Image (cartoon, rainbow, N blue to C red):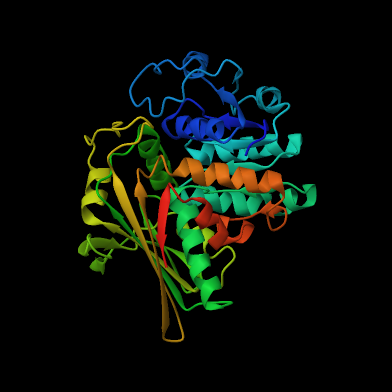
Amino acid sequence: MGAGRTVAVFGASGHTGRFVVAELRARGFVPLLVGRNEEKLRALAEGRPAPGPGAGAEPGPGPEWSVRVASVDEPASLDRAFAGADAVVNCAGPFAETAAPVIEAALRAGIPYVDVAAEIEANLDTFAEFEERARAAGVVVVPAMAFFGGLGDLLVTAATDAAGWAAADEAHIAYGLSGWHPTAGTRDAGAVSRRRRSGRRVRYSGRQLEYRDDTAPATKWDFPEPMGTRAVIGEFSMADIVTVPSHLAVPEVRTYMTVEAASELAAPDTPAPAAVDEHGRSAQTFVVDVVVRSGGVERRVTARGQDIYAVSAPLAVEAVRRVIDGRVKGAGVRSAGAAFDAADFLRALSGHVSVEW
């Protein structure tokens, strides 16, 4: 499927980066392992456990892989690292610090860029700062191509496309997680986002982002069985409030999170994910329940799967494959739903994500 095409993975030795490397290898791509820590990168290339906690997936030895040390503080090192690559996937957060330098390097190299950013402000920056430049350069930039941001956007887009709607009145994306053992990267990214918004929360309402000082509302969501009705935090905003409105005329985009998962994320002592299978996935399961409404008519799409970090890998790699194959809707900064045929993309995730229409 990858036909030997070379893909640079920035942050390859991180938790999600390892899943992306494994997925690239499974699809026939040749990964370039890029990052700041040469020891961790070489351990990954040789199939050894990474030094330190949170090793993530173990792709196994790959003697054909190149290890390239690079830092966002040294543009020339990024240029050397991406030389000869057909695309780059950025898995290194916080993306408020890494996205812009890596996109700049991708533009200099003239290659497509994909990232797995869940940070709202970082994704806003990508759209604001790079849309015109990427389009002028003929380069595709796909931010938030992950569980948060990408999957929800694909589900909302598929629902509106199936209904034949050019617009909708509201979109609701409810996350039912069996639990949430956050990685160190997730914690670091969350801390950066909180600082950037001065501790306020954010929601998308009335066609704009609102930064608020009040407490997010508590409510309930009727998930499909067997999960059933659960207490959720309303307006638990993730990257979907950036990706969906970037291309769909939906004035209200709301996201929800099960209380148990949100509590684990907030707790400072919740452990990182632990692998339970040969793919390095944790035992965490998820349900993403999407409801889109227009003129009193409702459309519902539900996705199920295992491990929100692991599932970001097939999302990102499928995006790379389609961009390289030319199955993308134009250059510039594009969210998942804007860049690809949403329903066809979701079908391609079979085996990783089960979608119910």
The residue lying toward the viewer, choosing from 340 and 41, is: 340
Residue 224 percent coordinates (x, y):
28, 65
**Quadrant of residue 175 in the image?**
bottom left
**Can residue 150 be seen at all in this image of the molecule?**
yes
Identify the residue shown where x is 25% and y is 57%.
Answer: 258
Residue 95 in the image: above or below residue 12 = below
Judge whether 67 appears above or below 236 on screen: above
Position above or below: 221 against 177: below
Image location (x, y in percent) of residue 84: 73, 27
Displayed quadrant of residue 79: top right
Q: Position of residue 155 (x, y in %)?
A: 47, 62
Foreground residue, 109 or 19?
Answer: 19
In the rendered view, would you say 279 is above or below 47?
below
Quadrant housing the N terminus = top right
Where does residue 263 sit, x and y in percent of width and height? 22, 48
- Horizontal relation, residue 105 to residue 203: left or right: right
Most distant residue in the bottom direction: 295
Q: In this view, does 342 lie to the left or right of 231?
A: right
Asked whether residue 215 appears in the rendered view, the answer is no
Give the position of the C terminus as an image quadrant.
bottom left
Residue at (40% x, 55% y) in the render: 354
Given residues 127 and 336, the one toward you in this image is 336
Number of callouts: 0
